[in-house]
Structure formats: structure tokens, C-alpha cells
């Protein structure tokens, strides 16, 4: 047997079903997940059925694709995470003109952010990716386009949608707007804030 193919599933018990469940939970087809991880669909299928043992580079690649860690893929118990995120001045990370500040714990399947959207930035960028998104307008006015439908939202308004729906998000007035934003898996510059610098971009 070629060493790069890995060994029997008994060497890493439980990894195969976790790989399959994570992929399905992220809404990814076998082909899409394999392409992002640099594997063939047939090889990923063998990993998910336990016919091949994944190498460490494969586990690292799949962990990045699924937004998790190798330790969690291997079924190790993660260290206890702090459930509290304190407020404070808005000092976050900037990505393509938007400002992001974590509003939830890192390394979880669901990520919460506080976002500042300046006027005239990223308004023409159409996003399409697996997952769900929920946003709540804190200040200012937001324009969101979901498919062919455009909506103007003000403070207290919210939107919850499937991220595979083509969507555009922009501030609707010169002062910009501020949001609470929750997503399950976002393939964008914001993902680096949540999932680590090795996260793939689309």
C-alpha cells in the first residue's frame, strides 16, 4: 500500500463519520469539499467511509475547509472556552473597508461579529457560499439585496437567510451603519478573524 494513501480506519477510529458529518453540516458537496481541500472526490469519499486513513496534511486542509481544528476532527475534548465576551471600544480587524469585532467565542461553528459598514464600500460585491447568516441593524441604515429583492433596513430590523442565496450588503446612507452579524461558515476576509489566518477565501 502506498503510505500516502493511509492505512485502515481502525488507526483513527471515529474520524470517518466526523468528516462526513462536518461536510454535510457545512452544506458542501463531496466535490466542493474535496476541491477546497486539494483532494479528489474519490479520495475524500474513501476517507469518509473509513477505507483510507487521512494524513496530517489532509486533516489540516479539511479542518480549514470545515472551520474546525485537527483536535476536534480526531475527537479530542477541546479546552473549556470562555462563554463571556466583554464589550468595550470598537477596536476590531479591518478587511476590504469593513471593520469587524468578535462578539462571540472563536473556533465555534456559529460565529458572531459586530460589524461597521462604511458607505460606498463592497456594495457591488455579490457573495454566495454555504451556510446561514443573521444580521441585526444597530445604527444607521442598511441595504441588503437577496437574489432579485432589495430591502432597506433600519435600527431594530434584522434578516436571516441561506448564504447560497446571492446577496449584497451595503450602507444605505453616508454615515454608514453598524450591525450584529452571526454566520455559520463565511468564506470571506472576515473568516480570518473567526477561523484563523489559514482560512480559504473565495
Image (spheres, rainbow, N blue to C red):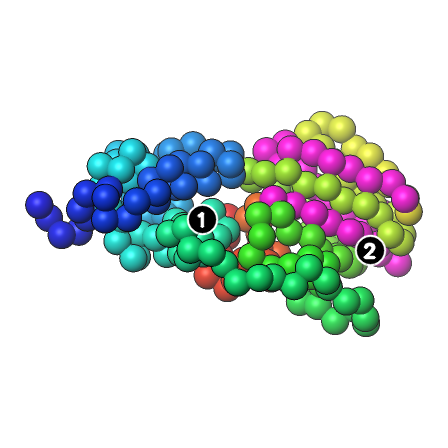
On residue 168, the disc is: none
Q: Which residues are magenta?
A: 156-184
Mark closer to the chain start, 2 or 1: 1
Above or below residue 121? Residue 154 is: above
Q: Is residue 133 magenta?
A: no
Residue 97 visible at all: no
Element type where label 1 sits in the image: helix
Distance in Å between CA atoms under marks 2 and 1: 28 Å
Q: Name the residue beneath numbered marker 1.
A: 65
Q: Is residue 162 magenta?
A: yes
**88 relative to 68 in the view: left or right:** right
Element type where label 2 sits in the image: strand
Residue 156 visible at all: yes
Horizontal and vertical percent for residue 98? 71, 59
Q: Name the residue beneath numbered marker 2.
A: 178
Horizontal and vertical percent for residue 94? 67, 66
**129 relative to 13 in the view: left or right:** right
**151 relative to 113 in the view: left or right:** right
Quarter assignment of residue 18: top left
Q: Which one is in front in this view, the residue at disc 2 or the one at disc 1?
A: 1
Above or below residue 92? Residue 58 is: above
Total numbered circles: 2
Quarter assignment of residue 52: top left
Amino acid at each position: 500500500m502506498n503510505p500516502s494513501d493511509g492505512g485502515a480506519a481502525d488507526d483513527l477510529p471515529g474520524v470517518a463519520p466526523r468528516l462526513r458529518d462536518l461536510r454535510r453540516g457545512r452544506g458542501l458537496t463531496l466535490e466542493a469539499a474535496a476541491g477546497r481541500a486539494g483532494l479528489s472526490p474519490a479520495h475524500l469519499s474513501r476517507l469518509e467511509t473509513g477505507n483510507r486513513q487521512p494524513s496530517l496534511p489532509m486533516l489540516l486542509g479539511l479542518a480549514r475547509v470545515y472551520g474546525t481544528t485537527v483536535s476536534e476532527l480526531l475527537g479530542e475534548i477541546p479546552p473549556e472556552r470562555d462563554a463571556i465576551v466583554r464589550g468595550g471600544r470598537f477596536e476590531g480587524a479591518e478587511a476590504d473597508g469593513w471593520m469587524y469585532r468578535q462578539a462571540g467565542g472563536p473556533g465555534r461553528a456559529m460565529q458572531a461579529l459586530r460589524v461597521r459598514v462604511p458607505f460606498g464600500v463592497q456594495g457591488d460585491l455579490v457573495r454566495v457560499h454555504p451556510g446561514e447568516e443573521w444580521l441585526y441593524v444597530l445604527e444607521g441604515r442598511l441595504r441588503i439585496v437577496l437574489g432579485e429583492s432589495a430591502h432597506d433596513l433600519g435600527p431594530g430590523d434584522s434578516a436571516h437567510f441561506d448564504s447560497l442565496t446571492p446577496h449584497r450588503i451595503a450602507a444605505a446612507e453616508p454615515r454608514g451603519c453598524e450591525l450584529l452579524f452571526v454566520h455559520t461558515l463565511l468564506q470571506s476576509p472576515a473568516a480570518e478573524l473567526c477561523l484563523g489566518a489559514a482560512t480559504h477565501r473565495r
